[in-house]
Image (cartoon, helix red, strand yellow):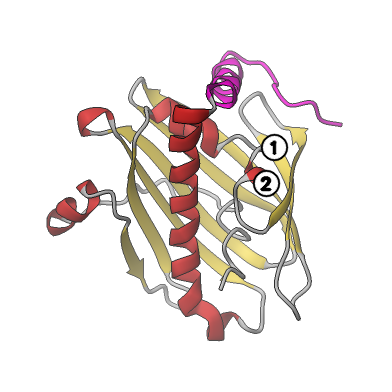
Amino acid sequence: MKIFLIVFILISSSSLAQSVIKKEDHKKLESKKAVIYQEKVKGNVWPRVRVNILIDSSPLEALAIFLALDHQKNYLPNLIKSTPVKHISATEVHTAYELELPWPLPNSKYTNGSDFKKISENKYMARWYLVESDSAYSVDGNVYFTRYNNGMTLMQYQTLISPKSALSGIVRGFMIKDTTDSIIAIRDEVERVRKEDQSILKKYISYIQRSLSGEKVYEVR
């Protein structure tokens, strides 16, 4: 079930707390499986979800594809629109999305803001905040890309969502799986373009570098 596959993964605001991986989960992580944690939050239908996964790329390469805002619709399932609409600053952009949902649910339309920063040559962080949405009351989340062993990058993603849907309590079991599947899709796209489509990778690395230099890279209204 892909109802929540993309709706919320891109509309999070940062709690700025980086996920900690348990010692007993490192073997699973290093076998390139997703390590998933859940945390119940009082008063919220859905738990806080943390997903950790390794990507065969550099932190910059992973961030570049993750924040390729107008490219997201090309590989994230059911996402039919991802259009940057406003620059707040060189690194901060508002993007309009539309997600195709299965009957009887109408398509989800939402706008989120995204921002990022370079922490070091080997570490980047991105965050999101809700601008407007017909699917959520609030969201809270962030992602870190950090250099790991053997040239890999550790992606640590977390989100807490307060959904509007009356079905949210019924389908919350699917939310965790769909979030994890989305992270895996992002990893797979990073690794795909690194091996098969260097032109796309170079384009979005350039976007990150130019943004950090103060240039507004997206053509928006």
In this rendering, the answer to whether 37 lies above or below 182 is: below
Residue 45 in view? no
Where is residue 180 shown, x and y percent of the image? 43, 60
User: What residue span does the magenta drawing correspond to?
Assistant: 198-221
Q: Which of 38 and 80 is in front in this view?
A: 80
Q: What residue is shown at x 73% (from left), y 63% (from top)?
A: 100
Residue 207 part of the magenta segment? yes
Q: Which residue lies furthest to the left in this view?
A: 24
Q: What residue type is labelled 1?
A: Asp
Labelled pair 2, 1 in contact (Cβ < 8 Å): yes
Dot 1 crowding, Cα within 10 Å, few <14, some 14–19, many 20+: some
**119 or 102, which lies in front?**
102
Which residue position holds label 2?
73
- Is residue 63 highlighted in magenta? no
Residue 134 sits in quarter? bottom right
Decide whether the magenta segment is chiefly helix, strand or loop.
helix
Position above or below: 64 against 66: above
- In this rendering, is residue 174 above or below 156? below
For the residues marked 2 and 1, what is the alpha-carbon distance in whole angstroms? 7 Å
